[in-house]
Image: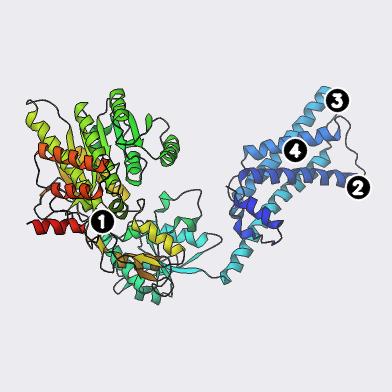
């Protein structure tokens, strides 16, 4: 990527002539050292011409070119030793001037010593003493004036910019983090934010920080912002809990106030401008609950120094599982996926972030029985995280055979091999769409859940007392923000394109969680699971998709249905208005974590589930969609199609009753 200096130079010689010196954030050290060397060389030539005007002829002990090379070389060495090139020139201080002085004087003294040695050895001086004194004065002055000029030019543009439009903002919080952010934004150049004051939960009418008022949040945040004549608020670190933050953001969005989020200054990147550290609030920040934080120690024994297989490892969920597993130093991490390009991208990422990690990349479909068997024979796998699946409801409604192949048969093959080869833990990633399914995708995931659960209890029943068996564990959660094909990236693209933002129904609601949270749940379930459980997650209150769309439009700085239209397109095949985490017959049991529960679903006999799945897979292989879905409904009686061509199958069943 081009740096700011390159861009500025290109602009200088472009037809548009858009050079703006304020866009050059800082000169790299090599550039400062190069300019200093040019100034030293220029000073030397100026000294030569001054001496010539005074009829002082250089000594002939060395050629002029040799004298120039020696003087410039020694001066360059002292510039390096005293690190005169370090630091930002626009913030030069008396200490920087002192470094320049020491470098220049050290050069002068060194040249005098060389003169003395030359007289002692060959009887002649190399340099004229008067010339060295003149050079000392000129070179130091040139280096000092260069820095002074840059500093003054910077101050000139800083003052001139005060007339430009700035974003006026209020910082929420008065802790050290908030004060550091305010100070950094005030000294940034070019300045983008003007801090008007601070908002605090404490009352102190006389308190001022950095010369700015501190107001108590005893009324709405919007009233406080307007009182300070500001346009935005900035959250600093984690000063508020989820409920407080949600209330403030809601108030701001309703009153067209921009919202920014800043990490603590200690976590800022050194390669990013101060303003770029501030991010517009993301929709992930608006989940009306505190983020889930799980105990890392629980997973260490499960993963560390073990052979771990992640299927669907290049997908949005699978790749995050891979990243989190990699931090626990597994013996070998095996990543399986049929998508070549995403797997290659993940390979590059892991090689950079975890260079010492032993990773095996396997391009394979989860229904390729022979290839999977070779994999299990080659590596003694300890834990499997099974994330490979087709997940898009409308597509699977049109392609039920493919849903059965990957989601059901793929899971069955992986589970059977795990049992055969003595894998310790098999953790399956499922979905809330498997509960009272209304579409083929959800039903296929429910069938997979039923199979691994029944297989576990079958092993448990048939295995001798102390025999180790594969622990099959299922994790079930809602929509994942930012995952491939999810609604948030779609809305972002639609907003960037100017709209419209499309919603299938004005009353549709969904549970949401972030990708890291979802993957933490998967790892935690693998660590705490005893076998046969379905873990579900307390995701707070469900989110109305219409509200989600409107908030995203407002966060982007637009007005819904004025700047960006919201268009209702109608429910898609298989889609329902709300998702559930529990079926009508299910109960929950608590775990050691308040946010994680166990769903006690009805468990059917393995023989029945196995034969049913074989029958479903056979119909799918024959590409007989109606027959496939009908058999799926026989296995899962609560599967009722919604807004789908397969609704007729439910009608036929009702008539038969």
Which is in the foreground here, disc 2 or disc 4? 4
Tag 1's secondary structure? Answer: loop
- Earlier residue among tags 3 and 1: 3
Q: Nearer the viewer, residue 607 or 589?
A: 607
Of the residues under marks 4 and 3, which one precedes in the sequence?
4
| Residue that badge 3 annotates | 123
Question: Whole-percent x and y of residue 76?
Answer: 69, 38
Can see residue 300? no
Circle 3 residues within 10 Å: few <14, some 14–19, many ≥20: few
* Location of mark 1 (residue): 290
Distance between the alpha carbons at the discs numbered 4 and 3: 24 Å
Q: Percent x, y for residue 30?
A: 64, 42
SS assignment at label 4: helix
Local packing at callout 1 (Cα closer than 10 Å; few below 14, some 14-19, many 20+) is some
| Numbered disc in front, either 2 or 1 | 1
Q: Residue furthest right?
A: 55
Q: Earlier in the sequence, mark 2 or mark 4?
A: 2
Q: CA distance from mark 2 to mark 4?
A: 22 Å
Could you tell whether 156 is left or right of 288 in the image?
A: right
Query: Which image quadrant for residue 20?
Result: bottom right
Nearest the viewer among 264 and 10 is: 10
Give whichever of discs 3 and 2 has the lower sequence position.
2
Q: Which mark is residue 72?
A: 4
């Amino acid at each position: 990527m081009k740096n700011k200096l390159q861009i500025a130079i290109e602009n200088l010689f472009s037809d548009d002539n858009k050079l703006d010196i304020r866009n050059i954030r800082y000169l790299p050290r090599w550039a400062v050292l190069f300019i200093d060397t040019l100034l030293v060389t220029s000073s030397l030539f100026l000294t030569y011409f001054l001496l010539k005007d005074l009829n002082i002829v250089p000594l002939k002990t060395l050629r002029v070119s040799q004298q120039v090379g020696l003087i410039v070389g020694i001066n360059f060495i002292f510039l390096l030793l005293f690190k005169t090139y370090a630091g930002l020139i626009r913030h030069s201080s008396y200490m920087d001037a002192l470094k320049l002085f020491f470098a220049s004087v050290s050069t002068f003294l060194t040249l005098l010593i060389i003169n003395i040695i030359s007289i002692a050895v060959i009887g002649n001086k190399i340099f004229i003493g008067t010339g060295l004194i003149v050079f000392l004065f000129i070179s130091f002055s040139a280096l000092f004036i260069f820095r002074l000029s840059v500093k003054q030019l910077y101050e000139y543009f800083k003052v001139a910019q005060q007339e430009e439009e700035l974003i006026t903002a209020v910082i929420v919080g008065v802790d050290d983090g908030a004060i550091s952010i305010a100070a950094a934004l005030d000294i940034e150049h070019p300045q983008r934010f003007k801090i008007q004051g601070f908002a605090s939960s404490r009352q102190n009418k006389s308190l001022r920080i950095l010369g700015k008022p501190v107001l108590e949040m005893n009324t709405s945040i919007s009233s406080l912002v307007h009182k300070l004549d500001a346009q935005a608020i900035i959250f600093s670190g984690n000063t508020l809990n989820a409920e407080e933050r949600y209330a403030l953001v809601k108030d701001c969005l309703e009153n067209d106030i921009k919202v920014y989020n800043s990490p603590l200054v200690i976590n800022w990147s050194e390669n990013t401008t101060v303003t770029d550290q501030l991010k517009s609030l993301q929709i992930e920040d608006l989940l009306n609950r505190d983020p889930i934080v799980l105990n890392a120690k629980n997973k260490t024994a499960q993963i560390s120094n073990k052979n771990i297989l992640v299927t669907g490892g290049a997908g949005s969920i699978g790749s995050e599982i891979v990243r989190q597993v990699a931090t626990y130093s597994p013996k070998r991490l095996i990543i399986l996926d049929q998508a070549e390009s995403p797997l290659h991208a993940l390979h590059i990422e892991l090689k950079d972030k975890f260079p010492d990690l032993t990773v095996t990349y396997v391009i394979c479909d989860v229904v390729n029985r022979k290839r999977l068997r070779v994999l299990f024979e080659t590596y003694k796998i300890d834990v499997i995280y099974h994330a490979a699946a087709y997940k898009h409801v409308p597509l699977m409604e049109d392609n039920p055979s493919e849903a059965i192949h990957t989601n059901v048969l793929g899971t069955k093959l992986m589970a059977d091999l795990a049992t055969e080869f003595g894998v310790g833990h098999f953790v399956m990633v499922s979905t809330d769409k498997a509960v009272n399914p209304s579409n083929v995708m959800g039903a296929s995931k429910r069938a997979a859940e039923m199979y691994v659960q029944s297989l576990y209890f079958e092993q448990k029943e048939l295995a001798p007392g102390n025999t180790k068996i594969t622990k099959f564990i299922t994790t079930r959660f809602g929509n994942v923000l930012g995952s491939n094909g999810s609604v948030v990236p779609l809305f972002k693209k639609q907003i960037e394109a100017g709209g419209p933002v499309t919603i299938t129904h004005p009353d549709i609601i969904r549970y949401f969680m972030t990708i890291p949270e979802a993957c933490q749940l998967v790892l935690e379930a693998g660590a705490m699971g005893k076998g046969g459980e379905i873990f579900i997650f307390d995701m707070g209150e469900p989110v109305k998709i219409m509200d989600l769309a409107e908030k995203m439009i407002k966060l982007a700085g637009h007005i819904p249905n004025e700047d960006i239209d919201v268009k209702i397109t109608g429910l898609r095949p298989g889609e329902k208005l709300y998702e559930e985490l529990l079926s009508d017959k299910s109960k929950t049991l608590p775990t050691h974590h308040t946010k994680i529960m166990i769903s006690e679903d009805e468990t059917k006999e393995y023989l029945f589930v196995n034969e049913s799945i074989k029958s479903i897979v056979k119909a799918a292989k024959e590409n007989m969609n109606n027959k496939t879905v009908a058999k799926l409904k026989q296995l899962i009686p609560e599967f009722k199609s919604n807004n789908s061509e397969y609704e007729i199958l439910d009608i036929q069943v009702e008539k038969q009753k």
